[in-house]
Amino acid sequence: MPKWMNLTLVALLMVIVMVIAGCGQASAPADDPEEPADTEEPAEEPSEEPEEHEPVVILQGVDIDNMDPYQGQTLSSTNVHLHIFETLTDRDANMETQPMLATEWSVVSEDNRTWEFKLREDVVFHNGDPMNADAVVFSFERLDEMIAAGVDADNHTHNILDMESIVAVDEYTVHITTNAPNPVVPQIVNSMWILSPNVLADISFEEATRETAIGTGPYKMIEWVPDEYVRIEAWEDYRDGPPAIKEVMWRPVPETATRIAELKAGGADLIVNVPPDLVAEVEDHAGIGVRDVPGGRRVIIGLGHGRNPRHPALEDRRVRQAMNYAFDAEGMLDSLLGGLGEPAGTIVNPPNSNPDIEPYPYDPDKAAELLDEAGWVMNEATGVREKDGEPLSLVLHTPDGRYIQDRNMAQVIASDMEAVGIEVDVQVVEWSVFIGMAANQGEGFGDMHLIGSGTSFTWMDIAFLAADSGSNRVGFDHPRFEELYAELSQEFDPERQRELLWELEDIAFEEAPFIFIWFQVDIYAASDRLDWQPRADERIRMTEASLR
């Protein structure tokens, strides 16, 4: 049995022992209003010293969801894919756009619609196929075909790119023409993975979900056992030389306590989503360090309305605003998140965000006033507001373990809503099911959903609410917003971009299509043997790591 499996069993047994030991102790009443939302306690420290092991083991909250990078819908998948596949451009650790498979790019048409990309000439795929203009054209057109076929692929990137055509000018030059002038083409193509036509041209999109991954990246796929692990190993023939870390195993471990226990026992080198209230305890363990970074992930409670209708109350802007006033964001950050981060009032990351926008203050009286105005009156007998005999009862779907304290966040927010007469049924959904519910602009979600969305670190953050965006799972559809967004999407002048963006943010704040929570502070814990620093975009890159 592999050593990591032995260590996993040790860690799980430790957790079981802790649970049994706790059964003989008195428990606090479940309905005690003074108790904060439950947080998972870490397992006890193992008595033995952590063992050395290979490969480097990384524990994420959820498994990858697809072998095809265009059908992968989660960052957990992206973290694996980015080691195997590459793109024309990339982001460095400062979130600046850099060359990857392209060496240079520029606009080459008078109407600002055609971009030219020059490609590296020294790149091959893992199987020896050449990486050239034909491969780039195939990859971009394949995404077009997936969207046209109704496959749940990277709709967000597809829509922002808005490609009319792509042409191989010569073996190492491509021209990408967009339907309208598009100033963010160099940034958005960092999500367009380059694939080999010889591998994927003759298989179906469904088959591609399980096909062995062949890319040009520094690692090769070795094995994927769904819900257990993914193994990748350094590609010895990589053009820049093989990475220092030779083998990496990615494992899905949703339970915080289990991730921490495995790290302490030496069965893991890096874990994600350490709860803020456990940071000090984890840091006290020899051989482990906690590393955090202000991230760009926008965590929100989506409120279904507009083109994604749910409960009729959510169609009223006053109700959506009331829900923001009812949410004690600062209280939750202090009690549940260790005081890290700040409440959000926008979905656009600094420094691009509108500095004049302040988060909704905690004001339950204002929330009650708005709900009364909207005709949702408190039924004193039930404690739930009603209108025309219908209760203001909502369903909130949340994952567990995907984002920091996600399940507990949902419970806290539900409690805040109930304090003003909005009944909320929190339903915890396993991640593989949750991500399916999120497909097709969130058609599977109930009235509310807790979700985190990554960022472009540009003004494109506001595309989260564009009518045709795959990330617009709340159904937001606002004519003035669409008019301004269409103009912003074609604007090359930075000053005018800023003016348009800030007006769009004002509209989003006023319309309150979701409950704003925060930009997640990302907290990791790692073995001292791993020399690695976190990035603001949550990409875990072993090419930027080494073993001490």
Image (cartoon, rainbow, N blue to C red):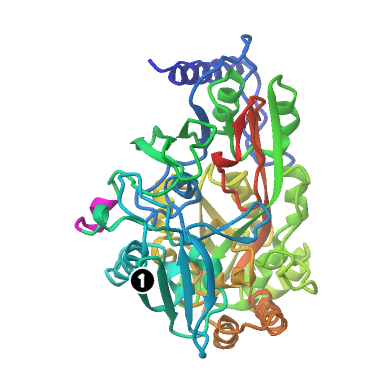
Nearer to me, 85 or 310:
85
- Quadrant including the N terminus: top left
Residue 203 visible in the displayed image: yes
Question: Percent position (x, y) of residue 250?
Answer: 47, 35
**Is-magenta flag for residue 245?**
no
Q: Residue at x 43, y 55 (%)?
A: 73
Name the residue located 75 percent from the left edge and 64 percent from the top edge.
364
Q: Is residue 57 above or below residue 411?
A: above
Q: Nearer the viewer, residue 35 or 178?
A: 178
* Lateral position of residue 10 relative to residue 409, left or right: left
Which residues, given as a range, are shown in magenta?
202-208
Question: Could you say which quadrant of the image residue 33 lies in?
Answer: top right
Near mark 1 (Cα within 10 A), the count class, few <14, some 14-19 or many ≥20, is: few
Return the residue nearer the eye: 505 or 92.
92
- Residue 107, above or below 324: below
Vertical order, 48 against 248 (above or below): above
**Residue 325 image position (x, y, % from top left):** 72, 66
Residue 246 locus on image (x, y percent): 48, 30
Q: Is residue 354 above or below residue 94?
A: below
Residue at (65% x, 76% y) in the render: 318
**Would residue 314 be seen by someone viewing this image from the given angle?**
no
In the image, 74: left or right of 353?
Answer: left
Q: Residue at x 64, y 54 (%)?
A: 413
Q: Amino acid at mark 1?
A: Asp
Residue designated by label 1: 170
